[in-house]
Image (spheres, helix red, strand yellow):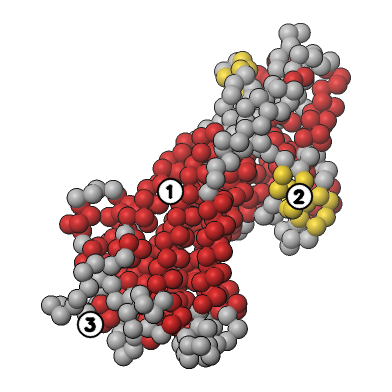
Amino acid sequence: MQMVTVGTGAVSFEDVVAVARHGAGVALSEESLAAIDRARAVIEDLAASPTPSYGVSTGFGALATRHIAPELRAQLQRSLVRSHAAGSGPEVEREVVRALMLLRLSTLATGRTGVRRETAELLAGLLTHGITPVVHEYGSLGCSGDLAPLAHCALALMGEGPVRNADGELTDAATALAAAGLTPVALQEKEGLALINGTDGMLGMLVLAIDDLTDLLRVADISAAMSVEGQLGTDRVFAPELQAIRPHPGQALSAANLTALLKDSGVVASHRGPDCNRVQDAYSLRCSPQVHGAARDTVAHAATVAGRELASAIDNPVVLGDRVESNGNFHGAPVAYVLDFLAIVAADVASIAERRTDRFLDKNRSHGLPPFLADDPGVDSGLMIAQYTQAAIVSELKRLAAPASVDSIPSSAMQEDHVSMGWSSARKLRRSVDGLTRVLAVELMTASRALNLRAPLEPSPATGAVVGLLRDHGVGGPGTDRFLAPEIESAYQLVLGRRVTAAVTDVIGELQ
């Protein structure tokens, strides 16, 4: 088993993906265990003091004014976790839950929260043994952190609540812990609060979305190149000297990809010369690097924000030296804003891809291709309705691009009177990323059929590899009408599994 070591510093993007998606185990470094012990000693001193200390010997939120007697503090922690594990709706994906558990552990490891080492080690043990608490779609307002989702995870550390084991089977936490040789913890002062007060859910989903979009923007360049090629467009507009006079870095990278993808294309070469009467291509072809490049730059900005958040210790209160201080670092606004920004990116990249697809299907704009790329237009409908599916998804993505982060709603008797809604931003972004994946899959299958129809002209080696990949996996070329849904699903799975970028990389090397 691959192992990720969590220290006092930030976990990396690669660590999050390894644990969340690939089942890597987790261990705490000796440095982090020492930091945890130091912070715990501070909490225990404060707990023994007659002076009330928020989160240690008081209630929480709007109930923070009540001093809690020592004999009630264990009950306070149990009650906090049980009452906050109030999620509702469908189960959240396993990869999201594992990401948020890792990121909570990363904050515990900084020595800023005051938990005991056995509590942190048990959280690492759940990850290593593949025990995933059941977390629900609704319950987080993204302020005071992702309270309900994290509380469902904390509940499992107490040996309570439903979980899924490493095989995905639903069971109860006590049974799963016992089967793994793990012992539940009885939470002590400050621990319940430390386990639930963070931006870990929304941050985990941000990191996973950045990982996905990094690949999908390369796929968008691939599908755009195939559309330019299949519609007899020009590659001259992607020349580096044209990008240099508008020096956005993402634009230059996207244009370089398009140039590399179209290199040695027999289709492009067939109409390059003095006899070509095409003045300029439509915006959806010509401006692909401008749109894809702006998307890349936005993802880069989101990655900067995510990197800062990965390096943060999010809790309230936090241990600073020999004292505990209340703060507002749990507010999810920095993460929520970029989650919403990325939903805009997904919608617009999908929108331009849909427009490129549509041009193939209109005989007045496709430069000699049959209507809807049909075998016998009128008898056959070709890819007409595949574009409808694509258009329906794009319309959905436009609705999802409306920001959730402006929709604050007060809670906790007006103590928490402005919240980030970052969890909601993250949940809708996951739908947006999936929708973009499906839209690009339809463009790929449409462009590949068009390139087949351009025979005997040959596509470039890179785009030809994608056509071959699609054909090898059940996405058929020109011919009479057939059941299209399985072909769309096959193309989607090839994009989702990153097989499309791999096919290109095998031919021309890594894309930018």
Quadrant placement of the C terminus: bottom left
Q: Secondary structure at mark 3?
A: helix
Q: Which amino acid is tagged 1? A: Val
Q: Which mark is residue 299?
A: 1
Mark 3 and mark 1: span between their CA atoms?
A: 36 Å
Comes first in the chain, label 3 or label 1: 3
Judge whether 460 appears above or below 213 on screen.
below
For the point 47% across and 36% down, the residue is: 308
Q: Quadrant of residue 263?
A: bottom left
Q: Quadrant of residue 316?
A: top right
Q: Which mark is residue 89?
A: 2
Q: Which amino acid is tagged 3? A: Ser
Judge whether 441 appears above or below 184 on screen.
below
Eye-nearest disc, 3 or 1: 3
Residue furthest top as drawn: 50
Mark 2 and mark 1: span between their CA atoms?
A: 30 Å
Q: Which amino acid is tagged 2? A: Gly
For the point 32% across and 55% down, the residue is: 290
Q: Considering depth in this image, is 18 or 118 the residue closer to the camera?
A: 18
Q: What residue sits right under mark 3 in the picture?
A: 270
Mark 2 and mark 3: span between their CA atoms?
A: 56 Å
For the point 76% across and 55% down, the residue is: 164
Q: Secondary structure at mark 1?
A: helix
